[in-house]
Image: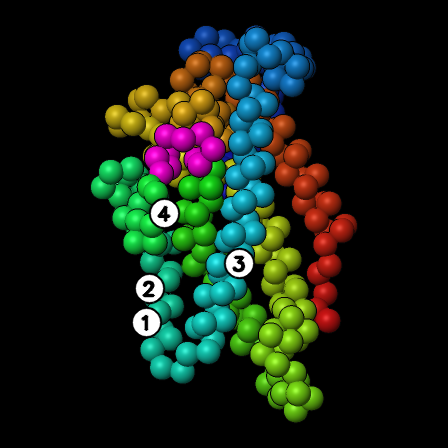
Amino acid sequence: MAYFIVFLLYPALSALYYSFTDWDLRTDAAWVGLANYVDLLSDDVKYPHFWKSVQVTLQYTLIAVPLTLGTALAQALLLNAIRRGSNVFRLLLFLPVVTAEAAVGAIWRWLYDPQYGLVNSFLGLFGIPGQNWLNTPELVIPALAFIAAWQCGISMIIYLAGLKGIPDSIREAAVIDGATPIQRFWRVVFPMLRPTTFYLLVTGVIAALQVFGLVYVIFSGGGGRSVTGGPEQSGLTYVLHLYLFAFRYDAMGAACAMSFILFVFIMIITALQFRFVKQEAS
């Protein structure tokens, strides 16, 4: 209870209070009421990149979440089919999750390098011309989403646990009925994984809407002091924008307001998922 009050409830209530103030961390906060919220949502001059950050974050979520879930499910199916050495492959596939965000960003900046990166070298094997992944606005979000899919180890483990929970008798009955492997997946395995998929969908969307560390490292340039958001702000995610307001633009009041706008948006999205996405196994 003490931990909840000191480290969670008090900071949250403080942030809510400061979201109604004009505060730069150095002087006393001045009460401005709903001005921060109104300006963020309607003043394109004062906050020119607010809606751009919303657009970037939504695009990232729409690409990264399905790509991550698909990759995790494919890896889980492969691991579930392996009889020997599955623990080794499970460890290798989980390593990106425990790798420090700074290291992940540095590695992928090198992999995406237009001249020396392995991604372009691999594409060259198939005659596909190389791309300037992190400096072409149209490619930034797909490149970030691919990194998120690479870090799908936790989702893969949860899917694998879901696969282990499907009774063998159901699979055997499908085989006896003459179902092909594809039919068994779509009519038996996938419906039985529906609760697992729903959980990963909800948590994945929440995590994607709050993506920060990876884009901060990738677009930080020289040690984090020149972080902007990529070419034409194409990688300016919502939380990165919030961070810039809080610690670069001395606008902590506006940053706190942004955090509660995101909180309300996440609550609405989560409620819609509970309302319209099927959760029960069939």
* Mark 2 → mark 4, Cα distance in angstroms: 28 Å
| Disc 1/disc 2 C-alpha distance (Å) | 6 Å
For mark 3, give the secondary structure: helix
Q: Position of residue 61 (x, y in %)?
A: 56, 42
Q: CA distance from mark 1 to mark 4?
A: 33 Å
Q: Could you tell me which secondary element the residue under label 2 belongs to?
A: helix
At label 4, which amino acid type do we have? Answer: Ile
The residue mark sitting in front, 2 or 3, is 3
| Type of amino acid at the residue the image marks with label 1 | Val
**Label 2 vs label 4, nearer the camera:** 4
**Residue drawn 42% across and 11% down?**
26
Q: Can you give x and y, in whole percent of width and height, for residue 270 in the image?
A: 67, 45
Query: N-terminal of the two: label 4 or label 3?
Result: 3
| Spot occupied by residue 173 in the image (x, y as percentages of width and height) | 67, 88
Residue depicted at 63% across the width and 87% down the height: 175
Please give the range of residues in magenta.
131-140
Q: Which residue is denoted by mark 4 in the rendering?
A: 128
Circles 1 and 3 in contact, beta carbons < 8 Å: no
- Within the magenta stretch, is there residue 139? yes
Q: Earlier in the sequence, mark 1 or mark 3?
A: 3
**Residue situated furthest right in the rendering:** 275
Give me the C-alpha separation between circle 4 and circle 3: 24 Å
Which numbered disc covers residue 70?
3
The amino acid type, in three-letter code, at marker 3 is Gly
Q: Up-down: is 13 above or below 245?
A: below
- Where is mark 2, residue-wise? 92
Q: Is residue 204 above or below residue 177?
A: above
Q: Amino acid at mark 2?
A: Leu
Secondary element under disc 1, as helix, strand or loop, is helix
Nearer the observer, disc 1 or disc 4?
4
Check disc 2: other Cα within 10 Å, few if <14, some if 14-19, many if 20+.
Answer: few
N-term mark: 1 or 4: 1
